[in-house]
């Protein structure tokens, strides 16, 4: 059975790291502590999930040991954003910074598991006419292409459609992670998050298209 990892790519030295700790760590008490809630939920089902927090200059032994495992990158996202947020008001990091920190944490290029961008709307492009910072490609697309360009060619990449639960909650199919939408102030269940998970195959960019055009003309 493969390992499951919650990866928190946020700098503990950042001025807003307290917001990340409040939401995902123990500072928020039982009402928050979202990672521990999911770790406990997995334990109830006989499964083990390990949390790994980014630490500058430190290669995490557990991250370095991963092979055919699942990594869930945690944080808040929006359609078409180039970044995710470590808790409400927490550090916002771009897809390139995420790649930097995954590598710095020890993820091997031979890693052949599943890298899941467990962030709301990570599989969605931005829509024209909305926030000017929210009109780009899907965050999962950006991460997949960036990691592939850095040599991570054996793993698979996934994003999610919609607003997903930050921790397992009760729903029509029992306690799971669901996608929900708010209609007239009421939260409505749409589907299980796993049903709206999308694989992103890296797009290989041709650095010198003119060369190939001359070659085949």
Image: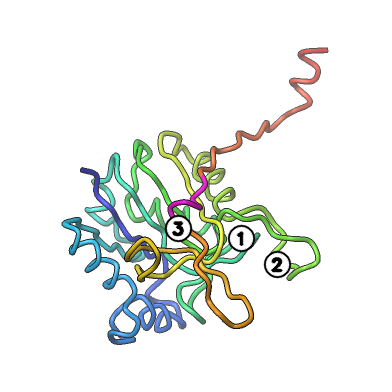
Neighbor class of circle 1 (other Cα within 10 Å; few <14, some 14-19, many 20+) is many
Quadrant in which the N terminus appears: top left
Q: Which mark is residue 73?
A: none
> CA separation, marks 2 and 1?
8 Å
Q: Relative to the observer, which residue lies in front, 129 or 164? A: 164
Q: Which residue appears at 63% of the width and 62% of the height?
A: 79
Q: Are marks 1 and 3 in contact (CB under 8 Å)?
A: no
Q: Which residue appears at 20% of the width and 59% of the height?
A: 45
Name the secondary structure under disc 1. loop
In magenta, the rendered stretch is 193-198
Name the secondary structure under disc 3. helix
Viewer-nearest of labels 1 and 3? 3
Q: Are marks 2 and 1 in contact (CB under 8 Å)?
A: yes
Up/down of 201 relative to 130, above or below: above
> CA separation, marks 2 and 3?
25 Å
Q: Is 194 in the magenta?
A: yes
Up/down of 183 relative to 112, above or below: below
Q: Which residue is mark 3?
A: 193
Of label 1 and label 3, which has the lower sequence position? 1
Judged from this view, the residue extending furthest toward the right is 217
Q: Which residue appears at 31% of the width and 70% of the height?
A: 35
Mainly helix, strand or loop, the magenta region?
A: helix
> CA separation, marks 1 and 3?
21 Å
Of label 2 and label 3, which has the lower sequence position? 2
Neighbor class of circle 2 (other Cα within 10 Å; few <14, some 14-19, many 20+) is few
Q: Which residue is mark 2?
A: 133
Q: Which residue is mark 1?
A: 82
Q: Are marks 2 and 3 in contact (CB under 8 Å)?
A: no
Neighbor class of circle 3 (other Cα within 10 Å; few <14, some 14-19, many 20+) is many
């Amino acid at each position: 059975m493969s390992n499951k990892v919650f990866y928190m790519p946020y700098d503990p030295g950042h001025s807003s790291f307290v917001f990340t700790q409040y939401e995902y760590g123990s500072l928020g008490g039982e009402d928050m502590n979202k990672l521990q809630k999911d770790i406990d939920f997995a334990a109830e089902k006989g499964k083990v999930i390990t949390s790994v927090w980014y630490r500058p200059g430190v290669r995490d032994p557990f991250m370095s040991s991963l092979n055919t495992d699942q990594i869930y990158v945690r944080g808040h996202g929006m359609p078409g954003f180039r970044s995710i947020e470590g808790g409400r008001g927490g550090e916002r990091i771009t897809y390139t910074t995420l790649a930097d920190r995954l590598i710095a944490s020890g993820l091997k290029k031979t890693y052949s598991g599943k890298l899941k961008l467990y962030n709301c709307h990570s599989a969605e492009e931005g829509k024209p006419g909305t926030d000017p910072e929210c009109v780009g490609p899907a965050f999962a697309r950006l991460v997949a292409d960036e990691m592939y360009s850095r040599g991570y060619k054996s793993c698979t990449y996934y994003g999610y459609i919609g607003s997903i639960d930050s921790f397992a909650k009760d729903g029509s199919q029992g306690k799971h992670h669901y996608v929900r939408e708010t209609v007239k102030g009421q939260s409505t269940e749409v589907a299980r998050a796993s049903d709206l998970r999308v694989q992103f195959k890296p797009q290989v960019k041709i650095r010198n298209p003119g060369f190939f055009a001359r070659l085949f003309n």
